[in-house]
């Protein structure tokens, strides 16, 4: 709460003080290149939600939508004053709006572009995605674009575990000094391109897929599961997560195929068994649903609960997408002592 109040008060003050500089910058952007004054970029915010972040446009309207340091020759896409705006960080001023509305903070991990899949996945794996993104951050004052993905996330993780008001003040002071010195914005040749030295684990994409699923971004969840499977074709968790995303989109045949694959890779994977039982019930296959429930009970005899636990689970808010008439299907033929399905979430989170 204190951080949010600080952000709002400081952003309001800077918006008033910077009104004239921002107006002049907008005029120069408009006079020196074709296109809108502001560029609204789809960014990844807290808990991997997507928001639009404004910046003064520094690149031509036909520029590829990737991080600028991944372009072969970023300078050829710049507007006549784009390089100056970036070196002075004037292009960042419209982000005061994002801070005012709560999408961003002054200090936090820089918000990833919506298509920076590797960065999003590694941040999700290390729970950096639980932070509100910032105008500047610990990684920004320790290398900015010169950092590899893993080094950048390492600084983000350090901030996650050490964030405080005093630390924020230290980062803001360091950022101000870097802006004055125009330091940290250049990109060495070795880091241009697709960063082939960076290897992201399948586990990172599995975690990222779970986060997308939680936000009901099912297509993005499937895409990250695909990436995880390409990296590790034996990942039972990736197939389970993709199956859950298929099921959420109504692609039941694809979901069943992936649940089957997940269980074939790991016959003791309780989460996948739980999910497949619910899918069988949804498809009206009572006997197959009960078979999967029986296997669940067999796997987890040490953690059993009453029949009422299943009723509670199936009628909870998290399960209201299952048809009411299938609740009885799952209960039919089950023993009095059955597994508490609430301990089996639809995703393997890690």
Image: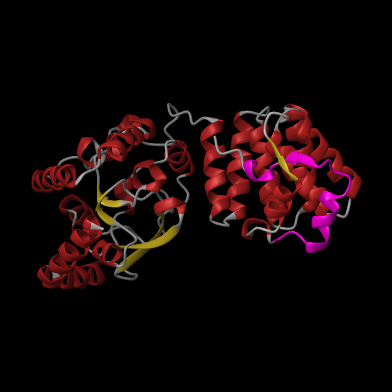
In which image quadrant can residue 259 be found? top right
Decide if residue 274 is on the left or right side of residue 334. left
The residue under the point 41% across, 46% down is 129
In which image quadrant can residue 265 be found? top right
Which x, y percent locates residue 317? 62, 60
Q: Quadrant of the C terminus?
A: top right
The front one of 46 and 76 is: 46
Question: Is there any visible trace of residue 81 in the rendered image?
Answer: no
The front one of 159 and 291 is: 291
The residue under the point 64% across, 35% down is 237
The residue under the point 29% across, 70% down is 37
Which x, y percent locates residue 68? 35, 47
In which image quadrant can residue 32 be found? bottom left
Q: Is residue 80 magenta?
A: no
Labels in figure, total: 0
Decide if residue 264 is on the left or right side of residue 174. right
Q: Quadrant of the N terminus?
A: bottom left
How has the structure been colored for display?
secondary structure
The front one of 124 and 287 is: 287
Which x, y percent locates residue 289? 84, 45
Question: Is there any visible trace of residue 287 in the rendered image?
Answer: yes
Magenta segment boundaries in residue numbering: 321-346
Which x, y percent locates residue 20? 11, 72
């Amino acid at each position: 709460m204190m951080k949010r109040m600080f952000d709002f008060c400081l952003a309001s003050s800077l918006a008033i003080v910077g009104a004239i500089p921002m107006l002049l910058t907008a005029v120069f952007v408009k006079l020196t290149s074709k296109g809108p004054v502001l560029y609204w970029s789809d960014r990844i915010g807290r808990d991997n939600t997507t928001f639009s972040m404004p910046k003064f446009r520094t690149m031509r309207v036909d520029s590829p939508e990737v991080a600028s340091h991944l372009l072969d020759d970023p300078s050829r896409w710049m507007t006549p004053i784009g390089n100056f705006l970036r070196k002075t960080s004037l292009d960042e001023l419209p982000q005061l709006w994002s801070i005012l509305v709560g999408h961003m903070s002054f200090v936090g991990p820089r918000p990833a572009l919506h298509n920076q899949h590797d960065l999003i996945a590694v941040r999700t794996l290390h729970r950096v995605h639980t932070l509100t993104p910032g105008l500047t951050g610990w990684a920004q004052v320790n290398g900015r674009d010169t950092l590899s993905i893993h080094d950048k996330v390492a600084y983000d993780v350090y901030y996650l575990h050490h964030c405080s008001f005093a630390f924020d003040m230290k980062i803001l002071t360091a950022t101000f000094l870097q802006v004055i010195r125009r330091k940290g914005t250049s990109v060495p040749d070795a880091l241009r391109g697709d960063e082939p030295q960076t290897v992201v684990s399948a586990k990172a994409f599995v975690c990222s897929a779970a986060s997308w699923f939680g936000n009901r971004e099912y297509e993005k969840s499937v895409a990250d599961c695909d990436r995880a499977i390409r990296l590790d074709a034996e990942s039972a968790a990736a197939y389970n997560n993709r199956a859950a995303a298929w099921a959420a989109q109504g692609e039941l045949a694809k979901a069943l195929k992936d649940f089957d694959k997940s269980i074939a890779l790991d016959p003791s994977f309780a989460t996948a068994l739980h999910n497949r039982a619910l899918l069988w019930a949804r498809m009206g296959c009572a006997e197959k649903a009960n078979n999967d429930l029986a296997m669940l009970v067999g796997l987890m005899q040490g953690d059993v609960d009453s029949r009422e636990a299943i009723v509670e689970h199936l009628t909870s808010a998290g399960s209201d997408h299952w048809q009411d008439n299938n609740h009885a299907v799952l209960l039919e033929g089950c023993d009095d002592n059955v597994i508490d399905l609430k301990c089996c979430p639809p995703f393997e989170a890690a």
